[in-house]
Image: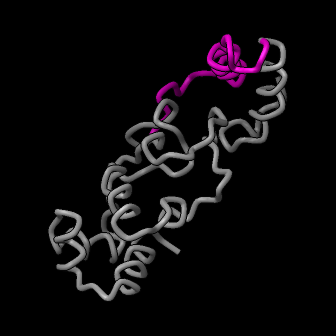
Amino acid sequence: MSIGERILEIRSEQGLTQQEMADRLSVTRQAVSRWERGEAAPGIDVLRLIAEAFGASINMILDLPDNNRCESCGMPLADPSLLGTEADGSPAVHYCTWCYEDGGYTSPDITMEGMADVCVRHMAVPGSGFTEDEARDFMGRLLPQLDRWSHESAL
């Protein structure tokens, strides 16, 4: 189901018109109409507002599994503020903001080994529970399973 179809479903379940939903979200009726028709998608802040205002989960609106991870670095995407953006400004539901922005990778030339190095630096910090060797081993197993790297050989 698309984001627009889920927004329509939420609105219908609440018994609201497009105008009433728009008023509750401080957007135009036309914006709600475009979302429902799939011509546009709400931004991350509006998605959060929809979830809060209508008691819906952001994962449900975006049709994300509860264990959604960035398909480039493996970071859990539990919060919509972590999502990257597509070229049209809509949320990139499979990538984090550090890996994917405006419809493309933020580091298009990075290798899988380079990505592992970046992730290990962030994971192996005091109090994280990971030693550098443990973080490197974890990333060596995780990265080859992600869409961006699945065609490359393991580290």
Q: Is residue 116 magenta?
A: yes
Q: Please give the count of numbered marks on the rendered protein.
A: 0
Q: Position of residue 97 (x, y in %)?
A: 46, 35
Question: Residue 54: x percent and y percent?
Answer: 37, 70
Give above or below for 91 relative to 105: below
Report whether 77 appears left or right of 88: right
Residue span colored magenta: 104-131
Q: Could you tell me which residue is drawn at 45 percent across and 74 percent down?
A: 6
Locate residue 143: give its quadrant.
top right
The residue shown at (64%, 32%) is 73
Q: Where is residue 150 in the image (x, y as percent from the top left)?
A: 76, 40
Specify the color scheme: one colour
Is 90 situated above or below 13?
above
Place residue 30 in its image quadrant: bottom left
Residue 54 against residue 150 in the figure, above or below? below
Residue 128 in picture, x, y percent from top left: 69, 20
**Is 60 left, or right, of 5 in this rendering?**
right
Check residue 109 for magenta coloring: yes
The residue that appears at 37% across and 80% down in the rendered structure is 8
Quadrant where the C terminus is found in the figure: top right
Residue at image position (57%, 44%) is: 77
